[in-house]
Amino acid sequence: MHSEATTSGIHVGYARVSTDDQRLELQTDALVKAGMLPSEIFTDKASGATTDRPGFIDCFRALREGDTLVVWKLDRLGRNLSQLLQTAERLEKKGVRLKVVTEAIDTSTPMGRFMFNVMGSFAQLEREMIQERTLAGLAAARERGRIGGRRPVMTPELLEQAQHLVLDEAAGGEGLSVAQAAKRLKISKTTLYRELSAAQAQEGANDLAA
């Protein structure tokens, strides 16, 4: 939920719970106590591992340079460190400050900005490591003669890179279509679609088992 218009310099809240039997009120009440307007709090009921978070995507798109994104806990922005770092970097590039109610993160302060920059450095390191693993995997495949004149087979490294390419920009990805990602990685669109669907199904099964 949110207001009809968002102007520069406002505080925008985001709250997320993983399942329908968890209550959003704990987070939204905490955000209101921190000074948020209920009309400026976006919400989701979705696993942090899934890319299907319409509330967060709407929230990210509503943010403008100079605004502040306020969350109850840092892990509400993502389930794993990779997703958190990517989101932090996207916010920084957009000129949006971040405030976490229950943790000592507030990028309107010198220490908060320092923490933000540290998170951005880790994000850059992770991207370079992913690229290095991908290139190493392709080189190893070529040495084994698996590529030759054919398209490269799907590897865990390629799948990881593909997931980043198709992930919505609001969640830290590049927002490419499956066809665009397949072309970038030089693999079959059908193969990529199949592997992405299988990976998403596995993530859903893992969430249910957690």
Image (cartoon, rainbow, N blue to C red):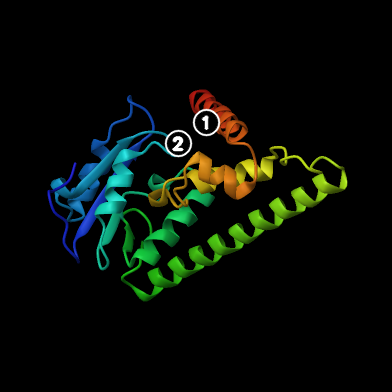
Q: Position of residue 169 (x, y in %)?
A: 41, 51
Q: Three-letter amino acid code at disc 2? A: Thr
Q: Three-letter amino acid code at disc 1? A: Gln
Q: Please say if 27 is above or below 208.
A: below
Circles 1 and 2, Cβ within 8 Å, touching? The answer is yes
- The answer to whether residue 129 is visible is yes
Q: Position of residue 13 (x, y in %)?
A: 25, 51
Q: Secondary structure at mark 1?
A: helix
Residue sitting nearer the eye, 136 or 49: 136
- The answer to whether residue 80 is visible is no
Residue under label 2, please give it. Answer: 50
**Quadrant housing residue 196:** top right
Q: State the residue at coordinates (44%, 72%).
A: 114
**Quadrant housing residue 199:** top right
**Going by the image, does 69 lie left or right of 130?**
left
Q: State the residue at coordinates (65%, 56%).
A: 131
Q: State the residue at coordinates (33%, 46%).
A: 57
Which residue ends up furthest to the front in the rendered image?
A: 149
Residue sitting nearer the eye, 175 or 105: 175
Residue under label 1, please give it. Answer: 200
